[in-house]
Amino acid sequence: MVSFRDPVEPVPVGLGGDRFLLRPIRADDAADDHAAVMETRELLRLWEQSEWPADDFTVEANRADLVGLQQRHAEHRAFTFTVRDPDDTLCLGCVYLFPTSATFLAKSAVTPVGNDAWEDVDVVSYFWVRQSQLEAGLDRALLDTLRSWLRDDWGFERVVFVTNEQFAQQVGLLEATDLTLRFELREPGKPGMYLVFG
């Protein structure tokens, strides 16, 4: 199983496919990622439970964010992958992988729905896809791919996927699978409940 603590341990560098590919996000993805973020901003505000991204969010501000994501990926503190078209010319979304010990998760109130223990979770995954890709079902294809990739290539046995209760489209996506609600999560200062499926 891939470790979030060992910065020299190899991790999967990405994944290719017919509909999309995954690779680590880089600061030089800023303009392309910004276009996807701004197209999807209304959904991302539900997902984030914040005003991010603001209507005046700039490419340079996005670049600063991506520098941080790239750094923590390199340090194995969390992993961020950009979802790209097969030719790697267009950003289609993003995937974030965290340990349960990530600072924002450690500060959150997590309530089991059943008998699961939060400390037994191997990886906490968040993802979004570009709004224009939802009708074509890219989010379902991405979810299916992530489930097998995180199990087979990363060695994670206990994977959970998180969304916000107000992001009805993604809640419906997760509920339509064989995944079940395992935990409810509240982040400090955010009004909505996060739902954790596994």
Image (cartoon, grey):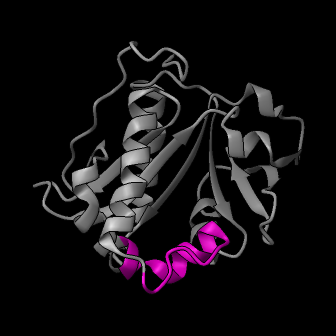
Coordinates of residue 43 in the picture (x, y in percent): 53, 78
Coordinates of residue 173 in the picture (x, y in percent): 56, 66
Q: How many marks?
A: 0
- In magenta segment, residue 41: yes
Pick the quarter of the image with the C terminus: top right
Coordinates of residue 10 in the picture (x, y in percent): 35, 16
Residue at left 35%, top 75%?
58
Residue at left 38%, top 79%?
38
Res. 15 visible in picture: yes
- Looking at the image, residue 197 sits to the left or right of residue 63; the answer is right
Q: Quadrant of residue 52?
A: bottom right
Q: Which span is picked out in magenta?
A: 37-56
Outermost bottom residue:
55
- Looking at the image, residue 129 sits to the left or right of residue 106; the answer is left
Give above or below for 168 relative to 4: below
Which one is in front, 194 or 150?
194
Residue at left 39%, top 13%?
8
Q: Quadrant of residue 90?
A: bottom left
Coordinates of residue 149 in the picture (x, y in percent): 40, 35
- In magenta segment, residue 126: no
Res. 131 visible in picture: no
Give above or below for 87 relative to 35: above
Which one is in front, 189 or 153?
189
Which one is in front, 15 or 68?
68
Give above or below for 41 relative to 7: below
